[in-house]
Image: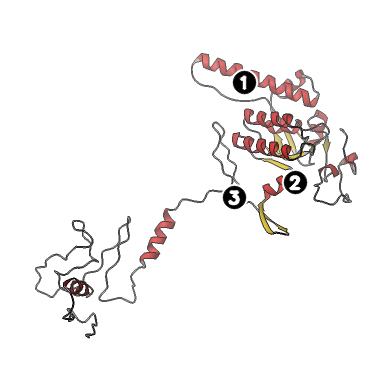
Amino acid sequence: RNNLTLSPTHRNPPLPTCCSPILAAFVASLSPTSHPHQWRPHEPTPSRPHHASPRPHSSDSNPPTSPLPTPPSRSHLAAPGPNPRPNPLNPAPNPSAAAMLRRLASAAAPRAFFSPSPAAGHAPRREYGLVPMVIEHTSRGERAYDIFSRLLKERIVCIHGPIADDTASLVVAQLLFLESENPAKPIHLYINSPGGVVTAGLAIYDTMQYIRSPVTTLCIGQAASMGSLLLAAGAPGERRALPNARVMIHQPSGGASGQASDIAIQAKEILKVRDRLNKIYAKHTGQAIDRIEQCMERDMFMDPVEAHAWGLIDEVIEHRPISLVSDAVSSEPPKNSGGGENKGTEEPSPA
């Protein structure tokens, strides 16, 4: 048996006599300084296949030297050939690491949780960069919920940000689901919205009136435009606002383009929408249509006390009343619970 040893100092190492021609060619190709006519798989050329790319003839009388491996292209990563004279100060790059860096650089940025595309004609987007997760321990183990799903178990629905079609579809689905779970239990709607699309807001409003479950509304932050209409559309006696919230009402706005007849059609439609909204405000606030039209001619901002006097809410609260305490919490009322004169009562009466 012959022992075959390959060394960078041997240009053409001796081959065993019993080797087949194919094996001999393969062993010869492993030599970093083999003959120029021998097979060199590490030197691909554009005109020849990768598996049969011979080294071109050289007119130099000096003995051939091993060239540097061809750098990998951006589209693929070719296997580098052996380096006859490795440089410890400048090592060759790792092909797998280079490929990984290229994949990371070309990867698209991760999409934020709950980042839907903006509705047509409505630029603001709803983005939650990081949604907290809640770990629930049960007899069967642990289960993780995102915070909004956990609040949904307590029959709490949140409207945060602009009201668009995607927001309306989510809120409507949650209201219908909670009604199917228990139509007698109230649903708590927390509103912090600058307003949005009229049709999306009316979809939520109609669903609130459609379901059998009473819907309590609470303004945190602000309830402007369509947000104020949803705030006023809560169940009688169950419309509340926190002390530092604000409410704003105004008439609808929009635009139209095209031919004169098309603009006239859109103008008539927006006037119909304004009349419909005025009637809804009159139904839930008790105000006269004339006063509503006068107040909504321009933006009208109100603090919670003014909103209570205007009829948009029934109560200004600082602490959670008993009627908003979850069933999971003990029935014992906390010492600081209640809101205004309705502290400690199960069903607060309208102010």
Q: Which residue is mark 3?
A: 129
Which is nearer the eye, 229 or 18? Answer: 18
Query: Which quadrant of the view contains residue 211?
Result: top right
Nearest the eye: 101 or 171: 171
Question: Can residue 225 be seen in the rendering of this structure?
Answer: no
| Element type at mark 1 | helix
Q: Callout 3 environment at 10 Å: few (<14), some (14 to 19), or many (20+)? A: few
Residue 298: x and y in percent read 69, 25
Which residue in the structure is indicated by mark 1? 270
Say which label, 1 or 3, has the lower sequence index: 3
* Image depth: mark 2 or mark 3 in front: 2
Q: Earlier in the sequence, mark 2 or mark 3?
A: 3
* Dot 1 crowding, Cα within 10 Å, few <14, some 14–19, many 20+: some
Q: Is residue 42 left or right of residue 141?
A: left
Residue 154: numbered disc: 2
Spatial separation of the CA atoms under disc 1 and disc 3: 36 Å
Mark 3 secondary-structure assignment: loop
User: Which colour style is shown?
Assistant: secondary structure
| Residue 166: image tag | none
Mark nearer the N terminus (1 vs 2): 2
Please name the amino acid that badge 1 sits on. Ile
Disc 3 residue type (three-letter): Gly
Q: Is residue 266 visible?
A: yes
Image coords of residue 4 (percent x, y)? 23, 82
